[in-house]
Image: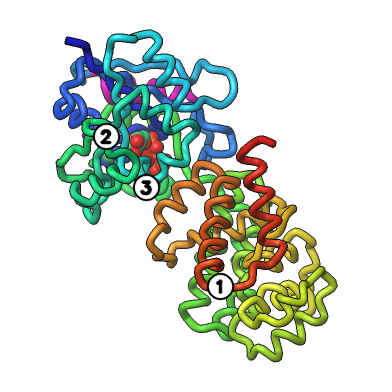
Amino acid sequence: MSTAIGLFGGTFDPVHLGHRYLAEAAVREAGLDRLIIMPAKIPPHKADAKIVSGEQRLEMCRLAFADLDKAEISDYELGLEGKSYSYNTVRYLKDRYPDSRICFIMGSDQLEVFDTWYRWQDILEIADLIVLSREDSLDSDELKKKAARISDKPGKITVISVEPFEISSTKIREMIGNNEDCSCYLDKKVIEYIKANGLYKAEAPAPWEKKKYSVYKTYIKEHLSKKRAQHSVNVAETALKLAGMYGADREKAYVAGLLHDVCKEMPAEKQLEYVLRSPLDVSEYEKKTPALFHAVAGSVFIREEFGITDPEIVKAIRYHTVACGNMDKLSQVIYIADLISEDRDYKDVKRMRKVAEQSLEKAMLEALKFSLADSVGKENTIPLCTLEAYNYFLKLKKGT
Ligand code: ATP
C-alpha cells in the first residue's frame, strides 16, 4: 500500500497550538505516515512589527513539533529563491515520492481562497486536501459544502469533523504586543524562545500617531452618524495596517481612511457643489449620480476645509468608490480598507480579508469583479474608470 505524506505549510509567525491541533488531527484522521511541516517565506512587506526571520520561524516549528510522532520540519521553501508557490512545492514532493499519496493540509480560511491560488486545479490533480474548520460558526457540514464547490471528486477533499480551535498567529502577535498573556495558545518552549529573542514586541508609535488627528475625528463625529463615524475610524485603522504591509505611506493612509466618507451625509445639492469645483476629471455620469458624489466631493472638501492638498490622499478619496486605471498603492489601500474594515459583515467579507492579506492587487481584482457583477445585476451604468481599473488588475494577474 502506498504511503500517505502530509504537507503542512504556513507562515507560522508564530507557530501556535491551533497548528498543532490541526497537525495531530490530520495525522490521526487521514492516517498519514509522514507529516512535513514547511514554513513559507514571508515577503518583507508582510512581516508585522519586528521582522521575524525564516530561521526563527523554523526553529519555533522545531520546538513546537519536536515530540509529535511522524512530524518532520522542512526548510525547503525557505531555501528557494524568490516567491514560492504551493503548486511548485506539491509538484516537488510528488516528483520525489511518486508512489505516495500527497495530502495538503489546511485550515478552512485557506480553503475559502484556495481557488485564487496559482494553479489550484493542478494542485488538486496531484494532491488531496485535508481541511479543518477554524471557527465555531462554521461546522463540518457547511465546510463540506464549501469543499464540494471546489471539487466534487470523492476523496479529493477530506473535512475533519472535530471541534475548531479558535486562535491565529495574528491574534497572538497582537496579544504579545499588548503585553497580554497568551500562554494557553503556545507551546512552553515556543514561549521561552519568543521571550528570549524579544519577538513581536510593539514598536513605539510614530509621533503623528499620538496626535490621533483629533480635529478630523471631532469633525466626523459631529457631522456623521455614529455608525459612519465608527466606520471611518475602522477604515483608517485597516488602511494603516495595509499600508504597513504593502509599503504605502502609513500616515497618509490613516488620514485618507478617516476622511474618505467625510461628505457622505451632506445634502446631495451641497455635495454636488463640491463635485463641480473639482479640478480632477469627473465624468458626466458621476455628475449625475448622487450615490457617487461623496467621493469626489470629499476630495475637494478636505482641501477647502482642512487644507489637505497631498495628491495621493486627494486621489485615494476621489476614487474610493469607482476606482481607476492607474491607482497608486495608497488608492488601492483605501479602496480595500473600505471593503474589509471591522464593521463590514457582508457574505464574502472573510474571504476578501484573507485575499487582502495575500496580495493587494489580487484583492483589487476580486473586489472589482464583485462590484462589476453587482452593477450588471442591477443594470447600473459602469463608469469607464471602473472598467479601466478592472482591465488593469486583470492584466497584472495574467502578466500580459
Ligand atoms: P495569521 O494569523 O498570521 O494569518 P495563522 O494563524 O492563520 O496566521 P498560518 O501560519 O498562516 O497561521 O497557517 C498555516 C495553516 O494552518 C493554514 O492552513 C491555516 O488555515 C492553518 N491554521 C492556522 N491556525 C489554525 C487553527 N486554529 N485551526 C485550524 N487550522 C489553523
362 or 38, which lies in front?
362
Task: Say which residue label 2 marks.
Answer: 153
Q: Is residue 83 above or below residue 328?
A: above
Tell whether 274 sits left or right of 223.
right
Task: Say which residue label 3 marks.
Answer: 171
Marks 3 and 2, the one that precedes in the sequence: 2
**Residue depicted at x 31% and y 38%:** 151
Q: Amino acid at mark 2?
A: Lys
Q: Nearer the viewer, mark 3 or mark 1?
A: 1
Q: Are marks 3 and 1 in contact (CB under 8 Å)?
A: no
Segment tinted magenta in the rendering = 53-66
Rendered image quadrant of residue 389:
bottom right
Q: Amino acid at mark 1?
A: Glu
Marks 3 and 1, the one that precedes in the sequence: 3
**Residue depicted at x 47% and y 21%:** 88
Q: Is residue 206 above or below residue 342?
A: above
State the SS at label 1. Answer: loop
Give me the disc on residue 379. 1
Q: Position of residue 307 (x, y in %)?
A: 79, 73
Magenta stretch: dominant secondary structure: helix
Q: Position of residue 125 (x, y in %)?
A: 37, 25
Q: Is residue 33 magenta?
A: no
Q: Amino acid at mark 3?
A: Lys
